[in-house]
Amino acid sequence: MNNVIEQLMKKFPKKTEFSAAMIKDAATAVGENPRSAYVNIRYTHNAPTVRRGVYNLESMMPKSSKAIKAPSMVKGVESVSNDEVFVPDYDPTFVPWGNFTEIVKVLKSGMFYPTFVSGLSGNGKTFQIEQACAKLNREYVRVQISPETDEDDLIGGFRLIKGETVFQKGPVIKAMEAGAVLMIDEIDRGTNKIMCLQGVLEGKPVLIKKTGEVVEPKDGFNIIATANTKGKGSEDGRYSGASVIDDAFLERFTITLEQTFPTMATEEKIVMKHMQKFEAVDEEFGKLLVGWADAIRKTFYDEGIDEVISTRRLCHIVQTFSIFGKRDKAIALCVNRFDDDTRAAFIDLYEKVDATVNAPSDEELTEEELLLRSSMITDEDNWEDE
């Protein structure tokens, strides 16, 4: 491993964060197995993850080398922070549907066109924005909003880097300078502290008050926000953390797209792609899952129940099925998060549509029952031959 780290330091003298591909290339250059080197660094040594596929290896670098590099680290803060701006990878499990076409058109236009996307949790809002950027090879920056998010988190603030106080630009400024897509995730989880984005939502230059610098948005810069509500809070209490967003703030979004759940045909494609991903293909199970979820959603919309099975939950069931190999166990484990009555209702509904769930396995049948089954199958074959 030391040879790989030294090769990375030699090739990238000012970096401490490296992608999986860079690690594997360095291993190949020093004659080591790329996969083994990556697994060793990523898992054995628990390299901290900066973002998907990028790891901070500073703790593994020789102390003497880090001491030599220290004076240049402050100078390199800007390039390190800019790693947050990137083109997302294409995900083979993605199926275009819903507002995907509209989002692609908005991004293709090149205009500054703030867009608000609302919809229930787990129906692919964030995923489709990411994949639209991947399709168009557009850089994007994702910002996750919480009640604690403030101007310092979004615009930037002073940080202590190697004993020196340095101003580090926030994700909003970095997206503006790069002409990237700024995706503000769960914007209705914020407080009035996010009002610092009012000027940004107008597409105008922004004054960084702490440094006096004026930043102009580069061509292509755009903002897309996601939320479970339309900024008016959650009356039914489903999203208790959702806040009421100032109307003047909401008015700065040009359009609002409502994301519903996919059609059954589309959802079947999504489920099957996840089954292929987890190498647990069962077409019958996939169709049953989608029909089961659709029935639950119809009851939910008719106000017959208070919970719903999301597309994300179906994908979780598929992954669980790939681990345990049993349909009923996969469903039971993935609906355990609901209250007892709802969980029991969901499981009971599935058992009614899947005849295999309560059917005894070969191990549970007696020898006489196995012989009877065998004779019945033989009789059916003979009947078909006639």
Image: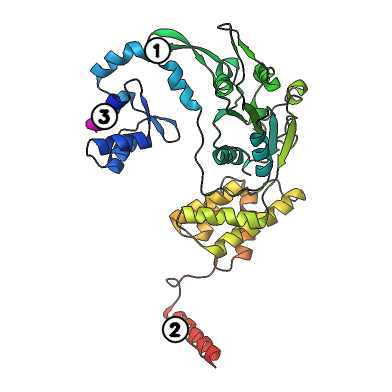
Residue shown at 69% from the left, 28% from the top: 114
Q: Which residues are magenta?
A: 1-7
Circle 3 — which element? helix
Assess whether residue 5 is covered by the magenta stretch.
Answer: yes
Kindly indicate the quadrant of the structure image that contains residue 127.
top right
Q: Is residue 238 visible?
A: no
Specify the label residue 371 is tagged with.
Answer: 2
Kindly indicate the quadrant of the structure image that contains residue 236.
top right
Specify the label residue 74 is tagged with.
Answer: 1
Residue 336, how many percent across, how many down? 56, 48
Front residue (pair 349, 124):
124
Circle 1 — which element? loop
Check disc 3 and report the residue beneath it.
7
Residue 285, how many percent across, how many down? 55, 62
Specify the label residue 124 is tagged with.
Answer: none
Q: Give the amino acid type for the residue marked by disc 3 in the picture.
A: Gln
Colour setting = rainbow
Majority secondary structure of magenta residues: helix
- In space, the residues marked 1 and 2 are separated at their CA atoms by 78 Å
Q: Is residue 306 left or right of residue 370?
A: right
* Few, some or many residues within 10 Å of mark 2 (<14, 14–19, 20+): few
